[in-house]
Amino acid sequence: MASHRRPKQPSRARVTVLTATAAAAVALTSQAAHADPKPSKSEVKSKVDKLYEEAEQATEKLNGATEKQQKLEKEVDAIQDKVARGQDELNEQRQSLGAVAAAQYRSGGIDPSVQLFLSADPDSFLQQAGALDQLSAQQTQQLKQIQAKQRKLAQERKEAADKLAALADTRKELGKKKSEVKAKLAEAQRLLNSMTAAEKAALQAEQDRANRASERTALTSAPGTTANPGKGTGMAGAAFSAAQTQLGKPYVYGATGPSSYDCSGLTSWAYKQAGVSLPRTSQAQANAGTRIYSQSQLQVGDLVLFYGDLHHIGLYAGNGQVLHAPRTGTVVRYESIGNMPFQFGVRV
């Protein structure tokens, strides 16, 4: 005979435990399903390369801000020196006119016009045309010279104040650019640190192979060889020859040599050795000569610009190669011009 007893119901405590356990299991499963998988070595390399490129973009902006600051500092110093000299000249002119007043006093009294001038504001006095009749021609000329000097000094002081304000803004901008570069490099380093020792070794091996390939290119594609019959001439040739001596030097943002370089630091240093002064940034160097848009027309030593915003620059090495300082983590080396988006060349 079948039993009709009702099955035993689970206690409320047991239901609570089971429910909590199930919820935890679901939560863990959900987290596992949505957790970001660890990026592969190639993904890390791609992200790091992108960050290095962005750091180089920020570096060229930093270089521009640095150059602007240095220029403004020189201008401010020059204006302040001019103001100081002008004030000395004004003091001498006042002393000269004061001597006239002293002589007049000794002879019986100071001319009222001179007495009024020796107060703080000669401009208001000179506006009284009738008073000029009371002065000698020499005194009138002295007053006019002093008036002109005062106006000039006022203009120069205003110019100095404007330059100082611009300098303060530039220094603020410089600080932001430095922070941006450092942030990009720190993020790249964080990604590199997330790799295993084996992955880091493999990535370093790839970089070493790229550097060795650069060395082989240097040996087989130097100007005048069978691989590259072209040869740099004039200033461009001299600049290229100088740049060749820097092969293997490390890339360091903001560096201009001789122990390390960034991209525009290398090109400006190389041309300096040839007696040519180039602007500091790649964007400014893009306007340093005649632009050449056809790669077939490039000559050894021509500047070559890359990327739409022109944030990278190198020297054409012939045979479809560029000699440049690529980015953080690399050295000055040769590379195929096709590895980057070529924009145009510049013949200085």
Image (spheres, grey):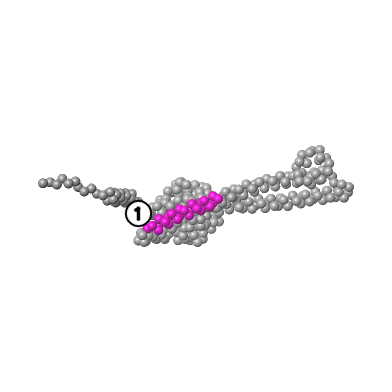
Give left or right: position of 201 versus 278.
left
Q: Main secondary structure of the magenta part?
A: helix
Residue carrying label 1: 38
Which region shows up in magenta?
Answer: 172-195
In this view of the protein, can residue 1 be seen by the observer? yes
At horizontal 76% and vertical 41% (from top left) the residue drawn is: 124
Q: Nearer the viewer, residue 57 or 318?
A: 57
Label 1 secondary element: loop
Q: Nearer the viewer, residue 253 or 340?
A: 253
- Percent across and percent down for residue 135 are 83, 43
Give left or right: position of 111 versus 49.
right
Q: Nearer the viewer, residue 256 or 269?
A: 256
In this view of the protein, can residue 241 be seen by the observer? no
141 vs 318: above or below: above
The kind of residue tagged 1 is Lys
Give left or right: position of 144 versus 175.
right
At horizontal 50% and vertical 49% (from top left) the residue drawn is: 283
Q: Is residue 104 magenta?
A: no
- Percent across and percent down for residue 282 are 50, 51
At horizontal 29% and vertical 49% (from top left) the residue drawn is: 16
Q: Residue furthest right?
A: 108
At horizontal 75% and vertical 44% (from top left) the residue drawn is: 121
